[in-house]
Amino acid sequence: MDTKLKRYNILFKVLALAMIAVLSCLMLSSFIEFYNAKNEMGGIGNLTSEHYTDTWQHWSTRNRIQSGVNTIVMYESKQNILDGNTVSEREVENRVWSLFENNRYYTEKKVYQSEILYFDLELTWEEFQKQYAPNIKNIKNDVIQEHLQMFENAVYALENTPNIYYYINVGGNVIWNKAYENIANRQYSEYQELESSGQNSSAAQWAYAFDDVYIYKENVKFLNAKQNVTNRLIELSFLAVLFLACMGYLIFAAGKKPVNSQNVHHIVVDKIYNEFVVCLLFLSGYATIFCAAVIKRKFFNTAFMFVLFVASVLLAVAFTLMLVRHIKSRTLMKHTLIFSVCHFIVNIIKNVYNAGPPMLKAFVLVTMLGLFTAIPFAFIITIPVALICAYIYIRKYITVKNGVKSIKSGLYNEKIEINGTGELVALAEDINDISAGLGTEVERRLKSERLKTELIVNVSHDIKTPLTSVITYVDLLKMESIDSENAAKYIDIIAKKSDRLKTLIDDLFDASKAASGNVTANLDEVDINALITQGLGELDDKIKASTLDFKINLPKEKITAYADGKLTWRVLENLLSNVFKYSLANSRVYIDVFEDEQKACISIKNISADELNIPEDEIMERFKRGDASRNSEGSGLGLDIAKSLMLCQNGELIVKIDGDLFKAQLKLPKNSLI
């Protein structure tokens, strides 16, 4: 399932990248069409216009024509300009004054740039009138020429503007290409009649109009372009939403894996420092804009530039996702070259400082503090720093002191919590380790003492019970005649209890011998299937006599182990003996044989008749039994002996308890190298 999710995760990311590449091409193509349609429409500002005559191009043309008409009306004719009627005295005075100011500024600039002040070089009004008399005299002619040039430009522009009709009559001077009456009655026309307002003004009549066919064609072109722009905007908006959706998914999935979506997973390229990633992101963005501009202007091969554009977009996406992964893992600032260099330098200083003895550190700190204090007003900084450092170290010292008191009182589980670095932190960690070790040792010793006490009690009980029976029945035999019918029964009980004492002593001897390592194991290849089959065959009568249903699961292939066959069977015999003694009547017993890469395994599972209210880690202790009443015939040494015999063969015995289910598993090495 995890593999399938991982495959889908990678597939979705690849599909999102492919979609971004396709959408980039479509968006660029749509943008180029939008740009061309916008130019045909005359700019995005005309999108709200309903007719061509409402566009800024048309208004610009009207304003230009109106400006030319106003110029012609104002100057009337060339002759009127040449006669000087368009030049006012105020305008000439302003020109003269402007000439004076410019020349005075130039003269003063020369004076101020020289090392010696020549006050006699300052330009006065009287000197200016004398020095620049010819220029002053020609100012009016210059203004006339400027007016004449403006008049001629206005007439020229009017005569060379296509698709318009105009008529201008000022004081009998007429400039026209169509009669006034034919213009004033048109749909797209402007006209006006001005009467003479004084001595220097003449009556004027003017009108201009645009050709109806021209307006119609321009309106059709404008409406088509407007519709095209609207369609392209809708298309661009839709493509942009899809692009942002794909980009949003990639940002959401960046650094995540289906198996563990909580942690941020980095890839190899994330090792590049973030400064370089930002620069590369900027360059890829610039390359994207450049490719778009080149494609729009058609300087180079369009297909080639489209490929470069898509590559630039994908690179920009990749660099963005690199930054996103660092943002998610909160390493955006840490994974920078500046931070790495500073962190490296700080670590060197810190390691050098921490490597020195405490006395040297104190000497260096006090010396540096004294040197800084010698600087004027440096105490404003050094004294607060010293107080803060002293406060921090005193708090750490108090924490360590309180922690030692707690440990001294026997609270070994409490830890001294100090953040940071330094001698006190290292001391606190050492004290915590010592405390943990003391706690473990105290717990081990308490458990050992408890087990020893239980061992003495259990051994005493197990030996006392049959011994008491033997003594009791011996006394009874003394009081009975040999021919008594009870004598045989008493003798039989004495024999059974004696056998139990012998078994207990033998088990004690075997347990001691196995625990001390005095058991010799003859290791060789053992066929586990054959061992199980042969052993169960020997116990067939006992199995049939019991009410237990044995389920044997042996694999078809041969499983061998590097072990001692006799010791292994003895372990199995002990386990099966417990099965016969303690299993619930009419329950099932499962024996499974299997293997892994290094070990052969035998599993035995049965349901206990009594409640198993004993911990797993104590059930293999000596003289421990599943029945707390200790009424069964067992000695409580079987599992301990089995465990020791397994260790002699480089194997292990694992016991698990789940409710009333008892599970014992034997693990033996498959070869001598393990």
Image (spheres, grey):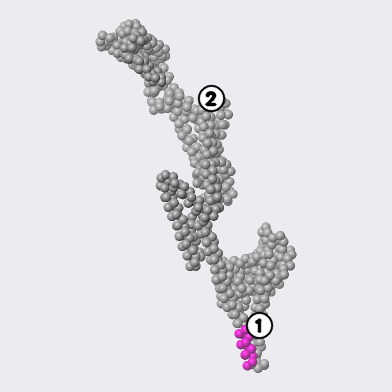
Quarter holding the C terminus? bottom right
Question: What residue type is disc 2 on?
Answer: Lys
Depth order, front residue of 209/115:
115
**Magenta segment:** 467-479
Q: Is residue 507 above or below residue 283?
A: below
Up/down of 449 relative to 400, above or below: below
Q: Secondary structure at mark 1?
A: helix
Q: Is residue 428 left or right of residue 564?
A: left
* C-alpha separation, residue under disc 2 versus residue under disc 1: 112 Å
Q: Position of residue 538 (x, y in %)?
A: 71, 72
Above or below — where is 346 with respect to 516?
above
Q: Nearer the viewer, residue 482 or 140?
A: 140
Q: Residues within 10 Å of mark 1 (few under 14, many from 20)?
A: some
As for residue 525 lying within the magenta part, the answer is: no
Residue at image coords 67%, 67%: 647
Disc 2 designates what residue? 298
> Is 68 rendered above or below residue 32?
above
Report helix, strand or loop for mark 2: loop
Residue 571 in view in this figure: no
Q: Position of residue 500 (x, y in %)?
A: 65, 80
> Residue 478: which quarter of the image?
bottom right
The residue that label 1 is drawn on is: 498
User: Earlier along the polypeptide chain: callout 2 or callout 1?
Assistant: 2
Q: Main secondary structure of the magenta part?
A: helix
Measured as percent of width and height from the top left, residue 452 is found at 58, 74
